[in-house]
Amino acid sequence: MRLMRIKQRINAGSNVMLDRDLNASLRRRALPVILRALLLVFFALSVLSSACAAQPRSVDKRLEDLTSTSRPFNPDDMQLARPAPPVELRIVSVGDIMLHYPDQRQYDSDGQPVFADYFRFTAEVVQTADIALCNIEAPFGGGTPAGYPIFNMADEMAPAVAAAGFDVVYTTNNHMLDQGSEGVLRTVSLLRESGLLVAGSRLEENEPAFVLYNTKGLDIAVVAYTYETTTLGSTRSINGIPMAEDLDPLINSYTSGSAADKDELRRTFDAARAAGAELLVCYFHNGTEYAQAPNDDQREMAQYAADAGADVIFASHPHVLQPMEFLMPAEGEVPVPVFWAMGNYVSNQRLESGMDAENEQGIMADVRISYNSQHQQIDEIHMDYLPLWVDRYSDGTRPVHTVIPERGDLAENSALATSGHLDRALAAFVEIHELLGEAQTWKRAT
């Protein structure tokens, strides 16, 4: 019994010893692992501590580098990724400005010329346009003004046209040679001095046969041509006046049916496009006087111009109105708005002078274009007009010559109140609407 208890104690002691030995052995084996783990933790902490200590300097340096090489963020830069909005353009043009009477210089009570009378009721509309054009159908020859049949425009008309808001003057017409070669050149000089661009004639042969006008970031070319009264193969002439040989390169004119003149027109268009023109306006001085429908020559030249790349076509000369319409180019999907004849703007062709009521009528042609700069194409065209009526009367002290637009204030118009011509103006506007009809719109299919 005692022996058994001794054995049990021995065995228990042996187990204790074995456990102690085993634990000691395990501790000896685990020590290197623990030490290595501790070393790794220490190393990681030291690296992290070093990184944390260095981070502020690194961020500061990085911000400094970015600031030195980049510009500050601008919210407007986000617009660069978006398509550019279309350019909305308004182009207006009026017909013939001509004074049939020699006593052109009228003065107010202060002794100032009253050429601004012609534009007093229309200037506000003209000035809202992005580009405004007109035809002055008489040369500025200097000296004494003259009316029908050999015209010479008073110099005061040039600054009056500029002050009214017009930007470009067509000088190609059947009276441009009335004061000879000197009159042609002086006309160009005077208009330019007044701040106007001149389309159709120039001073030097090396000048382009077109003018460029920039508005809203777009370059618009204006090309103007007049018909000739030339029999094929003979000396070139305008309105029966022979053209001096050295003047021919300075004038845009054509003989009906001349293939060479058509080629010249196309080359002028091509040169304008090569010079950067994104839109091209063409003006023709042609047609049959006092006819209210376009003739074959008008249609032939307009179709040729549309095929050659014109975007808008204005025309005058008949001294009466003719319709407007869209003309489709032979190749292309965008129609060309054509105003066959814009009638008179300023003239003395009135009932009182033995003319017809139609000679008192005109329009301000109004074309609105939505131009897609990104795709360099026209996306929408709106063709419209503002009816005009020419009034002339005496205010008791002098003759007053002005142009009345169809607006909502006709009953209160001071000129009509003085002249007593309200009914004539209203009748004219009815006839104009009957001839030209409603506004027309074309839009690119999406």
Image (cartoon, helix red, strand yellow):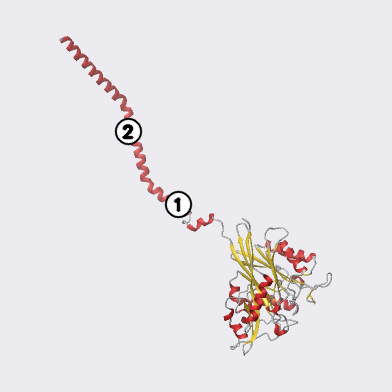
Q: CA distance from mark 2 to mark 1?
A: 39 Å
Is residue 316 found left or right of 51 in the rendered image? right
Residue 363: give x, y in percent of width and height.
66, 74
Residue 119: give x, y in percent of width and height.
62, 78
Q: Which corner quadrant holds the C terminus? A: bottom right
Instruction: Determine which quarter of the picture holds residue 146.
Output: bottom right
Nearest the eye: 122 or 374:
122
Q: Which corner quadrant holds the N terminus? A: top left
Residue 88 appears in the rendering: yes
Query: Which residue is at 57% across, 78% downward?
Result: 409
Q: Which amino acid type is shown beneath numbered disc 1? A: Asp
Residue 94 appears in the rendering: no
Q: Residues within 10 Å of mark 1 (few under 14, many from 20)?
A: few
Instruction: Determine which quarter of the picture holds residue 94.
Output: bottom right
Residue 308: give x, y in percent of width and height.
72, 62
Q: Are marks 2 and 1 in contact (CB under 8 Å)?
A: no
Query: Which residue is at 77% across, 66% downward?
Result: 261
Q: What element does badge 1 sit on?
A: helix
Mark number for residue 65?
1
Nearest the eye: 255 or 196:
255
Q: Is residue 35 above or below residue 152?
A: above
Farthest residue to the left: give it: 2
Mark 2, residue position: 38
Q: Residues within 10 Å of mark 2 (few under 14, many from 20)?
A: few
Query: Which of marks 1 and 2 precedes in the sequence?
Result: 2
Q: Which amino acid type is shown beneath numbered disc 2? A: Leu
